[in-house]
């Protein structure tokens, strides 16, 4: 599932691509993935693109905004309309039909469920292989009120002291469960929890009450570090995640423990282990993490 670095990479891409463009049409191919009256957003201009935890908020003119959750396999891919050599092109896609190895050249494709048309002819495609993702029309005011999410890691609110309070509030939970609970901290999922705990040299199985304050300080720095590496490399494309131009992220090439089970640790001679914890695959090094 896309986590903060992946969703933030998409948000930044959308911010550059669609702000200032007006929605000319919405084609909903799978109704269960789109909630709201689509006609209410036709003609509305995109003012801003925001993110809250793993959700993207497309700020529109008027009282309504769009809330997007990519869940496991959602994708947002943007194509500009270009006229080139008298041939109509939508981004890399050729209307004349030159087959290409890159399946994103074929948009819409079988996983495309919602298409936004902008007034300049560009398009935003919502693809979702497993159909768990969704797009909702929401009232801007309701969005502000309805927030049961913990602080954003990059916000001023998220200090080491705050992290210590969060950990102290769940003395019996293992530290990985604490990091991935969205009501405690926003945006950290399985990947970046494992990476953060590796950098902090803390075993994911340790419970909140056993984490010392110097470890909390290290964990705070490590969370920011792990998320920044994710952002720097455009998110991780282990599964279906892509950036808005359809290209894959490269963060997975920089993971220390996540999905490296059975391989030698970069920090010592141990082999990276994988266990089930809180129902999720959990990666760590017993040599580096205590
Ligand atoms: Zn190690």
Image (cartoon, rainbow, N blue to C red):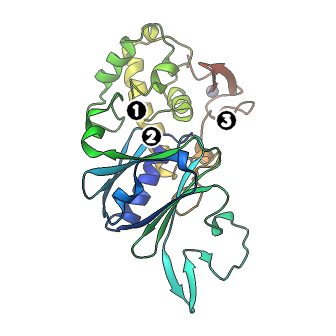
For marks 1 and 3, the one nearer the N-term is: 1
Q: Position of residue 66 (x, y in %)?
A: 38, 50
User: Which residue is at a point 41% across and 65% down the rendered structure image?
Assistant: 17
Q: Position of residue 108 (x, y in %)?
A: 61, 64
Q: Quadrant of the C terminus?
A: top right
Indicate yes or no: mark 2 CB to ligand 1 under 8 Å.
no
Q: Distance between the residues labelled 2 and 1?
A: 8 Å
User: Which residue is at a point 46% across and 8% down the rendered structure image?
Assistant: 210
Label drawn at residue 83: none
Q: Where is residue 67 in the image (x, y as percent from the top left)?
A: 40, 46
Label drawn at residue 186: 1
Q: How far apart are marks 3 and 2 (CA)?
A: 21 Å
Marks 2 and 1 close (CB-CB < 8 Å): yes
Q: How crowded is mark 1: few (under 14 residues within 10 Å), some or many (20 or more)?
A: many
User: Which residue is at a point 57% across and 39% down the rendered structure image?
Assistant: 1
- Which mark is nearer the camera, 1 or 3? 1
For label 3, the residue is: 259
Circle count = 3
For marks 2 and 1, the one nearer the N-term is: 2
């Amino acid at each position: 599932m896309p986590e903060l670095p992946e969703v933030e990479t998409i948000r930044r891409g959308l911010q550059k691509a669609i702000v200032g463009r007006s929605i000319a049409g919405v084609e909903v191919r799978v109704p269960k993935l789109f909630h709201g009256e689509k006609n209410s957003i036709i003609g509305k201009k995109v003012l801003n693109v925001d993110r809250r935890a793993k959700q993207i908020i497309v700020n529109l003119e008027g009282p309504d905004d769009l809330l997007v959750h990519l869940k496991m396999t959602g994708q947002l891919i943007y194509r500009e309309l270009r006229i080139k050599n008298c041939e109509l092109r939508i981004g890399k896609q050729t209307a004349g039909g030159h087959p290409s190895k890159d399946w994103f050249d074929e948009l819409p494709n079988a996983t495309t469920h919602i298409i936004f048309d902008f007034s300049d002819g560009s398009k935003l495609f919502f693809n979702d292989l497993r159909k768990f993702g969704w797009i909702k029309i929401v009232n801007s005011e309701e969005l502000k009120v309805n927030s049961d999410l913990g602080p954003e890691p990059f916000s001023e609110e998220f200090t080491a002291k705050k992290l210590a309070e969060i950990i102290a509030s769940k003395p019996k939970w293992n530290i990985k469960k604490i990091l991935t609970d969205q009501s405690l901290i926003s945006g950290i999922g399985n990947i970046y929890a494992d990476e953060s705990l590796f950098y902090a040299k803390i075993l994911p199985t340790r419970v909140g009450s056993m984490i010392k304050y110097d470890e909390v300080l290290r964990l705070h720095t490590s969370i920011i570090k792990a998320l920044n590496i994710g952002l720097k490399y455009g998110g991780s494309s282990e599964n279906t995640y892509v950036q808005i131009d359809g290209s894959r992220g490269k963060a997975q090439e920089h993971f220390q423990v996540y999905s490296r089970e059975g391989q030698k640790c970069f920090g010592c001679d141990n082999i990276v282990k994988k266990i089930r914890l809180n129902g999720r695959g959990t990666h760590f090094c017993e040599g580096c993490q205590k």
